[in-house]
Amino acid sequence: MYNFIRLLKLCKPHAGMLLLGAFLASLTVLANVGLLAISGWFLAAMAAAGIAGVHMNYFTPAGVIRFLAIVRTASRYGERMITHNATFLLLSEIRVKMFATLSRLNNVDLAMSRSADLVNRLQNDVDALDKFYLNVLLPIIIALFTIPIVMAFMSAYNAKVALICFISLMIIGVLLPVLLSHKLHKQADAETRLSAELKAELADTLKGSRELAIYQAHDAQLTRCDTLSQQYNSQLYTRHKAIANSNGLSTFVVQLTMLASVFVIIPLVATGAMKNVELAMLALFVLASFETVLTLPAAFIELPVALSAAERLFSLEDKQTPAPYKKHDQVNNQHALGLELTNVSYQYSGAHNDALRDINLSIAAGNKVALVGASGSGKTTLVNLLTGLWPLQSGSLKLLAAEHSVELSSLDANERFMQLTIVAQQHHIFDGTLRDNLRFAAPEATDKMLIEACKQAELGSWLNNLKNGLNTRLGTAGRKLSHGQSRRIAIAQALLRQGNFVVLDEPTESLDNHTKYSLLNTLEKVWADKTVLTISHDPVMLNRVDKVIWLEQGQIRAMASHAELVENEPDYVELITRF
């Protein structure tokens, strides 16, 4: 029920359109019920008049029938147009909300989720909610609005028939849906879970086809996919079987109700308490009245699926932990920022040891500092905490600006990344032109600025040899680039930024010596007045920094210049040589 209410809240911005669609749909149902009932009376009356050889006024009922037919057609057209437009509006609302939720998740939540599962939530779970309004909410609203009106008119003719019809309506519209919903609730959760697992496994199979071929594990992986497919198909069969049984039972109840109504009416016609032409009218009236609830069983079958999908989406939203962000003008327009970490510790969920433990360090504004350490020593964790993409668990992390110090957690994402320029080790290249990719870093940059950044990143000769220049498409994930070219494009993007604190993760990786030396000379000039923190094990890079911070098992083992560490620490020499 809680997730149902949250879904209703998503409908609030478009409530007017949704209610208008429900009104037109209800009007269509009432017009159809009235049309069938009056048509039954009219045909029976015309037949009786013909047998008796008397005249009757057929203009009025014919006019009413024509009017109801026009109302039904017009309202049906309007209902289809309005309800489908409302569905698209609601779907766009859900998609935007879901994408905004993913964009606000911290890296811990994203890292602990399979990318295929997140795509499945963004696409398939959202698509499952596509049916929420049309197939779930709309039938419920129609039933609540039309059943009292139909029962009021039917009671005016015969209370017993109305009671029989009402009981049958409750069986089809309430009892049967409740039973189905209870029966299929757990099945819906399993169906949604299996669908997500199957899509994730298929995505992994396609992405990892090379590794599966190398290790000859294709058969085992395909067997797993086939097992999940069979389990998922079994769940679908159960739901479709329930729908078929529900439709059959509903039809049976409708026919029994009409037959029972006829048996109630026949004695009244025989005694003259009711006109014979009203027998056909009431029989068809009873038959048509079930249009108000016939879609409810299917709605309650779809409801658990929609709620299960909603629960998966809302579970991501519930992971968000809004921070008390404030605007800090004192960090703006500074040439460089210092950094101070006090008692910073971090532990990953489920891990026994701390990734970082009681880190205390200070970097003065304008300093060039390197982080070194074996794999798992905490380098990347420290940088992720600095960028704010992973939440700080304990301790204090401050940016030092002139005479002020500002807690990093008090800056919102825009403020933080206005100050930070980051070149990550894994850098994504978008499927677009070189110009498009560079302008992600500086949307207002001119072509002259883009070309200059490429030259500074040692991409000048490569760019000059490109037939289409900045208009060259780089392919999905930069597949047309070498790893070294991809790294230099990332550095060109960083050069276009005006951040005051630069974070570089293995900036010289995959570069030849000539390119490396030229690039480092350029970076020293361009970022001479910036604070630079580099993760690197390259002796050439380490020899150019002011201080090296050596991390080991989540703690600082030593802080000194590269020359001092080389002279006094044999383990340090082995570390940078090994890398």
Image (cartoon, grey):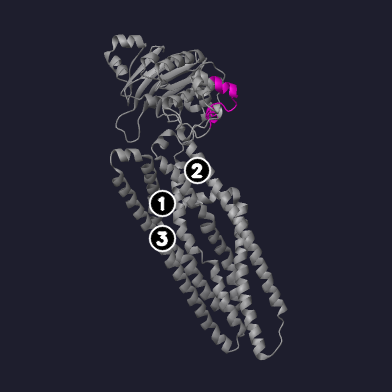
Q: Which of 39 and 150 is in front in this view?
A: 39
Q: Mark 2 points at which residue?
A: 98
Residue 443 or 8: which is nearer the viewer?
Answer: 443
Q: Name the residue under label 1.
A: 192
Q: Which amino acid does label 1 sit on?
A: Thr
- Residue 338, percent from left and from top: 47, 17
Looking at the rendered structure, the kind of residue marked 2 is Met
SS category of the residue bearing label 1: helix
Amino acid residing under circle 3: Arg
Disc 3 target residue: 239
Q: What stretch is highlighted in magenta?
A: 433-452
Q: Which residue is located at x 51 percent, y 70 percent?
A: 169
User: Is the residue under label 3 in contact with that under label 1 (CB below 8 Å)?
Assistant: no
Tell whether 496 sits left or right of 361. right
Which residue is drawn at the image coordinates 30% and 17% (left, top)? 577
Overall secondary structure of the magenta stretch? helix
